[in-house]
Image: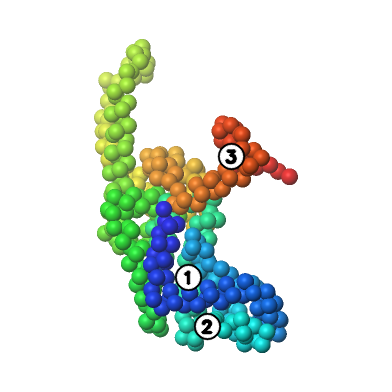
Amino acid sequence: MFCTHPELAAKRAFSLKAVSRLLGKVRKVVTFFHESTIAHQTLAVKQEMLDIPKHKLIYDVTTHWITIHDMLERYVEQQPAIHSAVLDKAVKKSAKDIAMLTDNELQLAEELVQLLNPLKTMTTLLGSETSPTSSMILPLKTMALKSMAPGPEDSATIREVKAAFTQDLERRYKDADLLGYLHRATALDPRFKSLPFLHEACFDRVYKDLVNKIVERELQFEAVQCKRPSSSSPPQKKVTMSNLFGELFKVEEQAKPFSKIIEEEVTAYKMADCLHVDADPFAWWKTNQSKFPHIAKLAQQCLSVPGTCVASERVFSTAGDIVSASRSRLASENVDMLMFLQKNLNVEE
């Protein structure tokens, strides 16, 4: 699932010595202000004096890597108030073990926040989408790698972070079968079918593979149908017009190869206008399935695969809310029905 890949790549980047040391110091400061009532009250006073938003410092959560971004962003925002509070007489004695960030470390924290902003946007998008399909994976991967491209003004540490993230993310998409499937899924999504992140030769290869997959799928379906016992039907009667004029007006029927039919259908689909990225691809296919009947069948198969594990995690969360301590004797069938209703029943107030 794509949702875990940026997390794993980010964890590798955060394990770099300079970044790990920075995060350790920030965590220690955040913990101090959360545990000390006097420090917390002093921070609130300093926030008001310096006209800084009265926001609480944020802990990062191990299982949610993006909270590192939130922790650093909040620390950078509150840094003047934090520094002033630590130097206050009421806090200074208890804060003797707290090491404030140096100017270089503070600059690194700001750079990390800027670097993680696009990744946080991607994570938020995947979590808020009602049906994030597997067709979104390659476009999101492309945008993630683009945000990690080295820049001329990058510090040495930021270059290391970008390189570590890029290497870890790229190695997870080396499998040829996985890439082939993701290319097909992306091409079958009318929002992304232009595949702008691929060069021309790869673009042509993806659509050629699409043709081959559709032909292969249809031939397999025909083979299965042939194996089924056919019900005997009475012979059709000759049409009167055909019986009368058949010999005089002969028509030579030229059967077009099935592969050619599919090629023409795929070409027409390829030439059709792309759907806006905010539009619903499922609604588009519902409208256009009669225009592209063979492609629509493969699209239904590919686009039904979710691109993240968010939906399944929400199912477990819903089950936990339903099967509480006071309802622990619910039958499994009733739990299934309650979960189905919770997810699918929209009651208008």
Q: Residue at x 37, y 77 (%)?
A: 159
Give the number of the disc on residue 339: 3
Q: What residue type is labelled 1?
A: Leu
Mark number displayed over residue 116: 1
Residue 194 drawn above or below residue 214: below
Residue type at the position of mark 2: Ala
For the residues labelled 3 and 2, the Cα–Cα distance comes to: 49 Å
x 53%, y 75%: residue: 28
Question: In this orientation, which residue lies closer to the viewer: 1 or 334?
Answer: 334
SS of the residue under disc 1 = helix
Q: In this view, does 54 lie to the left or right of 299?
A: right
* Label 2 to label 1: alpha-carbon separation: 24 Å
Foreground mark, 2 or 1, reads 2
Q: Which of 342 and 63 is in front in this view?
A: 63
On residue 99, the disc is 2
Give the image location of residue 150, x and y in percent.
Answer: 37, 76
Q: Tell me where residue 115 appears, x and y as whole percent.
A: 46, 73
Of labels 3 and 2, the one closer to you: 2
